[in-house]
Amino acid sequence: MKIFRTAREMRAWSRAQRAAGKSIGFVPTMGALHEGHASLMRAASERDDVSVISIFVNPAQFAPNEDLDQYPRTWAADLALAERTGIDAIYAPTASGMYARDYSTFVLVGGVSEGLCGASRPHFFRGVATVVTKLFNAVEPDHAYFGLKDAQQCAVIQRMVRDLDMGTEIVPMPLIREEDGLALSSRNKYLSPEERKRALCISRSLFEARAMLEAGERDAAVIKEAVRDGMSPTDIDYVEVVDAASMRPVDEIRGPVFVAVAANVGVTRLIDNILFEPESPKS
């Protein structure tokens, strides 16, 4: 397994693979890898001829009061998991290598980035879009795999790639949960045993919302109220029902939607969602 620290080294290796007729699959990560990441890594290893992950805790997507310094860094465990899932190369640049002192170029994606996490963390998607652009420029992947736990992030990257004619195919992958239903997240490491138990109300509320939708409920306000009630043990940031493509809130559920939530449990911010796709009326 190769490890590259600079964009020049990474790009040279990728171009050599492509010259040999190989496709490149890519999974961007910030490390602290878990089974959710592993599912993406296995998909890249299985679908593409060679597979790459990045490990880079991106300072551009953290506000000054957020957890950049505390974000878990587990390099040895990450390397072991990458090897077990068949990854061929790791791109692990330094912050100074990614962002020069006078760095001043950013990527802004309108529309899909403006609600949900974009409303409460206005810096976030600018940082995500910028770093993913830089990672794509270094790795030059054919396919990039993103988990739908971060459904809005996936939508932002899909829109960016489409609008800028980047040529990388974005492959959305299912959200992975722990056995008790908690959505897998690197930030779960922050939760105390009591907080982790309390956090289960998030997934339980979403599962109840899914049951309501499957039973025929189509009023988004009713769904949101039920989810908010279920998540009352947390400090709720948002509960929204949004169109799956535009990420815009809907009042009536007529097509695919995400029921998307964010909340703090203690000092830990967690996000989660369910995708609901109503059946088309039979003619």
Image (cartoon, grey):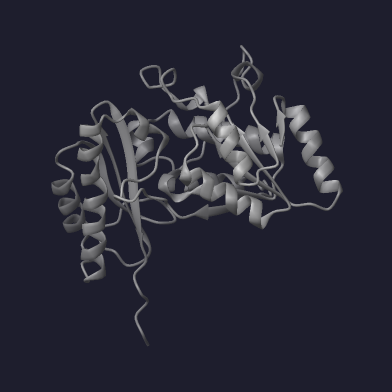
60 sits to left or right of 7:
left
Q: Is residue 78 above or below residue 45?
A: above
Work out whether residue 158 can be spotted.
no
Q: Position of residue 7 (x, y in %)?
A: 72, 28
Q: Is residue 239 left or right of residue 52?
A: left
User: Which residue is pictured at 49% across the width and 25% down the height?
Assistant: 73
Q: Is residue 62 above or below residue 214?
A: above
Q: Is residue 258 above or below residue 7?
A: below
Q: Residue at x 59, y 19 (%)?
A: 95
Residue drawn at the location 64% of the way across and 24% of the way down: 93
- In x, y percent, where is residue 255? 36, 66
Name the residue at the right extreme: 19
Residue 272 coordinates in the image, percent (x, y): 33, 46
Quarter of the image that includes the C terminus: bottom left
Image coords of residue 268 (percent x, y): 30, 29
Q: In this view of the protein, which residue sits in the foreground, 31 or 274?
A: 31
Q: Nearer the viewer, residue 242 or 4?
A: 4
**Residue under the point 70% across and 30% down:** 3
- Where is the N terminus found, in terms of image quarters? top right
Whether residue 96 can be seen here: yes
In front of the other: 240 or 21 = 21
Task: State the count of labels.
Answer: 0
